[in-house]
Amino acid sequence: ITAKVFESIGKFGLALAIAGGVVNSALYNVDAGHRAVIFDQFHGVQDIVVGEGTHFLIPWVRKPIIFIVNITLRILFQPVASQLPHIFTSIGEDYDERVLLPITTNILKSVVAHFDAGELITQRELVSRQVSDDLTERAATFGFILDYVFLTHLTFRKEFTEAMEAKKVAQQEKSL
């Protein structure tokens, strides 16, 4: 009887592992600041751009191609003079790497997540202003004044740009 119980548990475990593998292969994540296009084995690249989050797809038929938005900022900052003792004792001398770099990364991801790929390019000034406002507010909580925040560079990986251009051409051809 014990051998049959273990055999049943083994079969159930194997079935559960296989089912879990299928479900896992049907889910994919797009991180904040990233976008994806879907490649279908039968129809090629789909016309949709997928934003961040966890998404479902048909395993082995569709595949997400994740793209990264590359943003370069120029930031001029200074610590609030009266906050220097607190900054030194609580953060240390490498406060720019320990505070400004992480909050900049988080703010960029947060802001980029609110725009689609086209809007990031066409509304670049708005994106830059939003990053500046959010970053200035967040840096102030750590005792830093941001004198200048400017989005100097915004690009997508080559494959993403090509996919967007192909989509635009296809849309123009449909409207003719």
Image (cartoon, grey):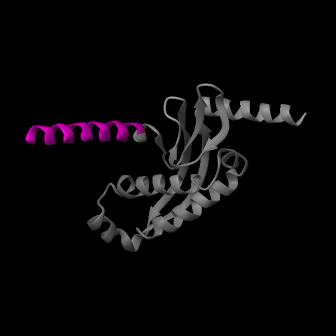
Side of 82 relative to 4 (left or right): right
Q: Does the magenta stretch include residue 14?
A: yes
Side of 17 relative to 174 (left or right): left
Residue at 52%, 46% (x, y): give it.
55
Q: In which quarter of the image is residue 13?
A: top left
Residue most extreme to the right = 176
Residue most extreme to the front = 1
Of the pair 152 and 58, the residue shown nearer to us:
58
Residue most extreme to the bottom = 82
The quarter in which the C terminus is drawn is: top right
The quarter in which the N terminus is drawn is: top left
- Percent position of residue 52, x then y: 53, 49
Side of 15 relative to 34 (left or right): left
Of the pair 44 and 115, the residue shown nearer to us:
44
Of the pair 121 and 96, the residue shown nearer to us:
121
- Percent position of residue 151, x then y: 60, 49
Residue at 64%, 53% (x, y): give it.
115
Stretch in magenta: 1-22
Q: Is residue 41 magenta?
A: no
How many circles with numbers are drawn on the protein?
0
Residue most extreme to the left = 2
- Majority SS type along the magenta span: helix
- Percent position of residue 110, x then y: 53, 56
Residue at 52%, 68% (x, y): give it.
137
Of the pair 53 and 13, the residue shown nearer to us:
13
- Percent position of residue 19, x then y: 37, 39
Q: In which quarter of the image is residue 118?
A: top right
